[in-house]
Image (cartoon, grey):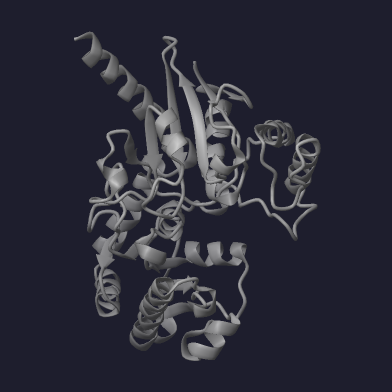
Amino acid sequence: MLKVTIFPERMVKATSQVFAGLYDLRHNKELRVRRASADFPVLDPESLHEWLIPLRVQGEDGREINAVIDLIDGQDITSIPHLEWADIYFKSSLRVGTPAYASQKVVPYGLRYAVTSSHESLLDRFHFALSAGFRGRGSPHTPSTWMLRPLSQPTWLAMSRFKSTEALSKLPPTERHFESSPSSAVTPRVYYRTKLYSLEAARTPEDAEEFHKVNEMRANTIRGLRSTFGRAFVGGIRPTPFALANYPDVVMRERQSLREHLEMVKRSAICVTTHGLFGSTDWKVAEYLAASKCIVLEKLADQLPVPLKEGRQALSFTSPEECVQQCERILREPGLLTRLRQGAWTYYQQHVRPSSIVRNCLETALGRKQASNAISSG
């Protein structure tokens, strides 16, 4: 049985898919999970990052490999000590032509979303937080004094398991809230709900330009979908003060909870998504795959271990006009609708479901070690 040692830094929504996968695989008796606060060389709090997950994987033959999973939305490697420690480095935002892509250690992670394992226990959270406290970093809501961290952080996270700290942290839904098979009934409509970025939050002129570009793409896509499909389109921009002041014609006036959003995804035949900032891949792609949707997405810039096949698992676009055309094509071709739903569901099961994506990473890591040993012995 595989053994996986986690060197906890902090548990946040962005990394929840990895921990959900580990706990699911443990439940399936495919591996053992251990948390450690020692044996990892980077102990300087300035070198830690809650969106980085260092792991040590031990195969059934005793071989060990150090792996880091980087879930940061950005092309740079933010912690060189993590890269140096790792034998293999999984990056969620990996693009051709970047320095990270040129490193032989760095490989694509895949599509991610925020999800909690139904097999995670209160004791799991307590042990994780206790180890993270000893690692030398607090949370935004607990004291950073080294004497208080080992006690305060586990207590806070344990309370979050029961949602007692709902104002501070809310656990992501479990898999069952996202999943819907291709045989489930859907309504022939297009759904796209998203947000805009306030230009006041931009720290540099470059950020402001990027915010505006993303906002315009999202707003114009919604305008095109509303104009073409009328009541067969559901969605819009979240009603923030910035959106109401600058894009009132595309604001979705009804407020919607996450659970209501996921139910709308399940009931809709077609779901649309566009890029995040600087071309990042939206978490909605993984959510749509889990719900076996006909996915129409802005052409992905990030590398995937297994690319989505055009016309099999999704249809892509590069402009609002092309998005509308792709949606029209699906609605007039029932065979394409069926194929896309089945393709999305199969891809999710093999490459996105928490247990699958983590299993794939572990197998890739051990395979890399085996290949390295074969080369050195040859």
Q: Quadrant of residue 22?
A: top right
Seen in the image, is 115 located left or right of residue 120? Answer: left
Where residue 254 sits in the image (x, y, percent)? 60, 80
Q: Residue 301 versus residue 23: which sits nearer the camera?
A: 301
Q: Quadrant of residue 39?
A: top right
Seen in the image, is 258 located left or right of residue 161? Answer: left
Q: Quadrant of residue 306?
A: top left
Q: Residue at x 29, y 58 (%)?
A: 301
Residue 176 visible in the picture? yes
Where residue 176 sits in the image (x, y, percent)? 56, 48
Seen in the image, is 230 located left or right of residue 195? Answer: left
Where residue 141 sits in the image (x, y, percent)? 74, 52
* 377, above or below 111, in the image: above
**How many numbered discs?**
0
Seen in the image, is 84 located left or right of residue 162? Answer: left
Q: Residue at x 39, y 72 (%)?
A: 206
* 122, above or below 339, in the image: above
* 236, above or below 24, in the image: below
Where residue 339 sits in the image (x, y, percent)? 28, 56
Q: Residue 363 versus residue 77: which sits nearer the camera?
A: 77
Q: Residue at x 23, y 58 (%)?
A: 311
The C terminus - image quarter: top left
